[in-house]
Each structure stands twice: as structure tokens, then as C-alpha cells.
Image (cartoon, helix red, strand yellow):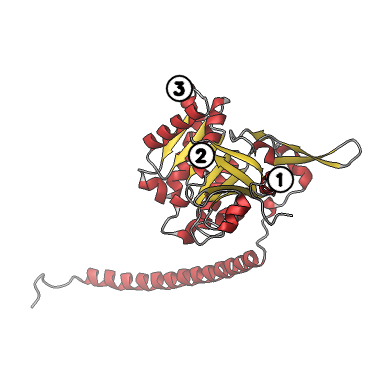
Amino acid sequence: MTIFGPVPSSFKRNIYHSTKFNKKIGRAKKLLIFCFQVLYYYWGEAKMRKDNDDKQNKTQNQSIYLASQLRGEIPQITGLKTGVEGLDNLFFVTYLDKKGKPQIKPIGGFPSFGIINITGIPDTGKSLMAEQFALTQASLGHAVCFVTVEQPAVFAVAGLRNRAASMGLDFEAIEERLVIIDASTNPVLREDLSSLLDTLAYAIKSYKTRVTIIDSITGLYEAREMMARMIVRALFTFLKKWRQTALFISQKRSGHEELTAEAAGGYAVGHILDGTIVLFKKEIMSRYDQSLYGKEIGDLIRLLRIDGCRLCGHDPRVHVVEILENGIIKIKEPLETYLRKLKKEGKGGQNIE
């Protein structure tokens, strides 16, 4: 029994011819698939050979220069006034005199385009030095980008205003040249490096800043010190690209050696940046210290040492530091000179020949 009735003979013939056609289509399809397989095979072989060639030759020719090719791009290193008495003359350049003998000449401040690490334990004057530098540059007409990581922007500005008064500067006359980036209250800026770099780029470009200060760089990798080198390297490369002169404030831990570049994150900051200024304080707690430094038990002596600078020469000696009652930091004579003076006056310097 059929539902639709008998199948016409013409329909049977159509089915026969359709079957023959389908067989031809099937053979063509197989041939086409075979051709694709052959082509894919040879493409794969070619790609494999290219990959092997790439692995064997990874030369980055675009990164090779003759020194003469860079002559027109080499920046002129000059000094940017620090605003810290006694510090400007601790950096110098070397030149040849008329007789061809090398001579040194102070540049009068931090080396331009240098990115300097200022490190030390708390209460050694790190932020004071950064603030005095920022205010001095702003008073000279240069825009300054100040990234505050430790305290909210309003309190950072309050500190800058107080420091300006101690330096005899009119804060209202320079506040338009102080660009504050508040990373303290914005976790995205502290935790997302790309957001921080984009924000810095916008500030530098919009306000044409010449100086950048980050206080502190340690706050950008707290609880993730394994990333310290990556974060510091990215910021260093970025600020070099934008031709900034910068200070990074970093914090020492209690177990770090006092007068070395070691800080939180290891030596990453000191190794990558152009130079390091180490600030240190020592509490007088023994009769020996009392007779050496000429101070009473419980007093403090503060010291500074420049621990290397790639861009120019520097004074390698340890210097005495003083923080005045009004919150101004100043650099005094070398420690050896200070101790000899005490010995001459009979006030200390014991065991100094």
C-alpha cells in the first residue's frame, strides 16, 4: 500500500540520472579535498621553515646604532636647582681644559633628565627634599607633576604650602604650576600600572611638566614586591621617553643597611634608576657615639650619601644633614670634616686621626 500512489517511470529515470550526477560530484569533492590537503601541507612546511628561521635569527637591527648617529639626539646635561642648601654642588660634569686635562665643574643641581632614587628609613628628610625641589622648580616657572601615593592630595598640598612658607615662597604665586595626581585615594592608579602611565602622560602633555615626583614609589608595589622591578622599569622608561627629570621616594626596611641603595623591593630601584641618594639617621645611644659625634645621649645625627649617578659625577663622601625646626632640610659639610672640626674644638671627634 502506498500513500501517494504509484511512482511515475519518468521520476525513476530522474532518480537514476541524479544518482550518476551525485557520483560525479562526489569524485570532484574528493579531488578538491585532496588538493586542499596538498596545499595545506606545503603551507605548513613553509610556515615551519619560516618559524625555524625566525627562531635562529632574532636580530633586532633597529636597536643597533653608531654613536655618531645619535649625536643630534644626545641631551645636554645641566643642573636643576634642588632648593636644598648644600646639595646643588654635589653633582658635577667633567670637561677638558685648554691643556687637555680633565676638570670638574658643579652643575648646580640634580642632573637634567635624570631619574633619581631618594631612599631612607622614616624621618630622614626624603619627602622634605622632594617638596623643596618641587617648590623651587615651580618658583622658577617650571610645571611640576607631583604623584602622591601615601597621603590624599589635600594633605599633600597642605604640606607643600607650609614648606613654601618656610622657604620664603609665595605659594599662591606658584600653585598653578603644581600638578597633583592623587594615587593615595584612587586604588586604580596604585594597582593598575597602565592607568597610572596614561594619567601621567595626560598630565605631562596637558600641563607641559618638566619635573615629576613620585612619593612614594614603594607604595605602588606594597604587598607585591616581586613586581617591584617591573613597575620601576616601566616608570623609568616612560619618564625617559617624556624627557622628565624625576625623583622617586623609596622606603627602607629596618633590616636594610643604612647607607646603601637597598630599599623595599630589594635593589630594583637603585639598579634601574640613574642614581640614588641615601638618607640616614643615627640615635646617640652610647658613650662612644657621644664622644665621636659630640652629641648627648638620645640626640640624632643625620647623614647623606650619593650612591652613584650615571649621568654625571658626584661627591662620594658622606655628608652631615640638618633638619631645621621649620621643616627645611639642608646639607652640611662632609662627615670627616665635621668630626675633625669637633676634635679641634674639643667637643668630639674622638678616635679620628
- Using the rendered image of the protein, determine whether residue 309 is visible from the camera's viewpoint: no
Q: Residues within 10 Å of mark 2 (few under 14, many from 20)?
A: many
- For the residues carrying marks 2 and 3, which lies nearer the camera in this image? 2
Q: Quadrant of residue 29?
A: bottom left
Query: What element does badge 3 sit on?
Result: helix
User: Disc number at residue 172?
Assistant: 3
Observer-nearest residue: 70 or 163? 163
Q: How many marks?
A: 3
Write down the residue under mark 2: 128
Q: Which x, y percent locates residue 218?
A: 47, 52
Which residue type does callout 1 highlight? Lys
Observer-nearest residue: 236 or 341? 341
Which residue type does callout 3 highlight? Glu
- Using the rendered image of the protein, determine whether residue 26 is visible from the camera's viewpoint: yes
Which residue type does callout 2 highlight? Leu
Give the mark nearer the N terminus: 3 vs 1: 3
State whether residue 244 is above or below residue 270.
Answer: above
Query: What element does badge 2 sit on?
Result: helix
Quadrant housing the C terminus? bottom right
Q: In which quarter of the image is residue 112?
A: top right
